[in-house]
Structures are given as C-alpha cells and as structure tokens.
Image: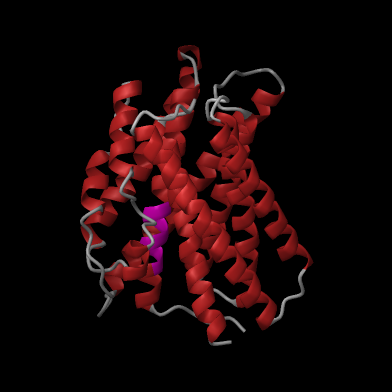
Amino acid sequence: MVFILSNEEFVMESINLNLYFLRSVREFCANIELSFLSNNETYINKAKEIALKCEEIGRELMKISNNKISQKALDYEILTTPFTLPCEELTEKLFDIKLATDITKIEVNLKPGIALNVTDELVKTIENINSRALAITKDFTDLCNDINKKLISNDLFSYSYPTMYEFMIYQTSIFNLELDRLINKDKMDPLFALNYEFLGSNSMKTISLFINKLVDSKNKEITVKSQEFADKFDEMAKLYSSTSLTPDNQKELTDKQITLVTEFKLFVEKCIDELLNSDVYFIVEPIFWDNMLTKVNYFLYILSINREKEESF
C-alpha cells in the first residue's frame, strides 16, 4: 500500500532534497570543468551550463526555504557544513573559478520550521522545481555517460578518471529515485528505505576509495584508514544483499550502518580540516571533499529517519 505525502510534507521534503542534490550536481560540474584541458571547451561549457541551471533553482529556493527546512536537516548539515565556504573560497583561489558562494552564505543562515498553510501556488512552484531538477539530472547523466564512454575508449582525456564519472552517474540515479518518489508524492516505504541503505553503502565505499587514491601516497595514515573503511562498507553492502527483510533485521542493519557512517564522517572531517590547514595534499579541488562530506551527512540523515520509522513498525 502506497501512502501519499501531505502538501506540507511534499514541500519540505522537496526543498531539502533539491537544496542538497542540486548543490552536489553544481560541485560535480565544477569538477568536470576543472578536469579538462582548454581544447575540450565543449564539455567545459556544458558543465557550466548545467551548473548555472542548478544555481538558478538554488536562488529560487532561497526565497521560499526559510522556516521550511526541518531542524533535523540542519542538524545533520545536509545543505552546508562548516567547511563549505572555506572549501569554496580555497577552490576559487587555487583554480580561478567562480562558485556560487552567495547561495552558501544564505544557506548557512536558514532557519528551521514547518511548512504550514501551504498554498496551491507554492505546491505548483515546488512541482515545477522538481520537474526542472529532473530535466537537469537527465542532462547531467547524459553528459557524464558521453564523457565516460570516450574516456574508456581513449577518445578523450580528463584529469578525473572514469570511476569518478561512474560515481556521478550513480549519485544522480539516487537523486532520480528520490525525485520520482516526490513527483508521485509517495511516502518512503520500508523496502525503499532498505534499498536506499544498500545504495548508500556502495556510495560510502566509493568515497573511501576516492580518499585512498587522491591523497598524497606518502600519507600512510589516510591511505590505510580509508582502505579500512572501504572494506567495512563493502561488508555492509553484502549484508544488505544477503539478509532477509524483517523488522528486527532491518533495525540491526540500520544501527550497524549508523555506527560505521558516524565513524566515517569524523574521518572525512579530519581529512578536510587537515587540507584547509595545509597538513595534507589531495589531487582534486577542495570543494570536492565538502561535496563528499555532505553525502556522508545526507546518508546519516536518511538513516536517522529510517531508524525512527523502524521504531514504529
């Protein structure tokens, strides 16, 4: 049985999702832009075009989001982190690129609240934003697929390897799942929640491997620790695939996942802090790591929601 979201739930969940994922796509676009040589201007310009569309929606959301963001979303720092603005500014400094720091400065001051007395006009505005976001994800996925296909056939060069583009495609597919659910105004059911936790395990494993492969190889502490996390998330993904779906099993899996992701969050934060203090070197733009941290935070946010719902099963 499918349960339908109320207008209030629809508005708040849509705002949370779009602010989180469209920022992520913007930062992925920055990675694409910075990973190409100047003779690949077509791909650079396409990434810029998609980023601008994300910024346009972001600025629209800034006008309607205050007091409509859940306290939990802010507590879990799914929109911005304490590192977001410093990472943006360092990226601008190192790469002579302009990022939408104006959106960040507004986002960090958003106040929590509950969407009350939602009007038909606001619902239509959010429906329009969701539809445009869906179109953006299609354009972005097509771009990444095109690049990835040409990279693996030696028809194109990028400083980001194919696994990075595969990860971007994977993350965008998760965004699509969430957008489809919201466009249909469906509440999250237990099966959807468990599937999301499995997808999240794979995402965390890939982020661990990015840290492992993009850090200066002489930094043994980070390379060893990141590989340990990759192995642990791989084991968690196998558990989700092999464990039968019962309320007790799902609670146990979620609890294990929350413990592991919380430890991983602290590790990622430590890496970013060391980067900003010039204690570690990564061969990728700084904002990439804040993007990864918000993914860790968003996964913890979803896990916490799932755990609350499991208590009511």
Pick the quarter of the image with the C terminus: bottom right
| Whether residue 71 is situated above or below residue 142 in the rendered picture | below
Question: Residue 302: x and y, percent?
Answer: 50, 66
Above or below 230: residue 253: below
Rendering coords of residue 36 (x, y %): 50, 20
The answer to which image quadrant residue 165 occupies is top right
- Which is the main secondary structure of the residues drawn in magenta? helix
Image quarter (top left, top right, bottom left or bottom right) of the N terminus: bottom right
Q: Where 3 sits versus 211, above or below?
A: below
Query: What residue sits 67% from the left and 29% below the top?
Result: 149
Looking at the rendered structure, the number of numbered marks drawn on it comes to 0
Colouring used for the render: secondary structure
Query: Which picture quadrant has residue 196?
Result: bottom right
| Magenta-tinted stretch | 13-20
Indicate yes or no whether the magenta region holds residue 235: no
Q: Residue 24 at x, y = what percent? A: 43, 45
Residue 310's image quarter? bottom right
Res 170 seen here? yes
Residue 43, position as x, y percentages in the image: 49, 25
Viewer can see residue 186: no
Question: Residue at coordinates 51% horizontally, 41% vertically from top-left?
Answer: 139
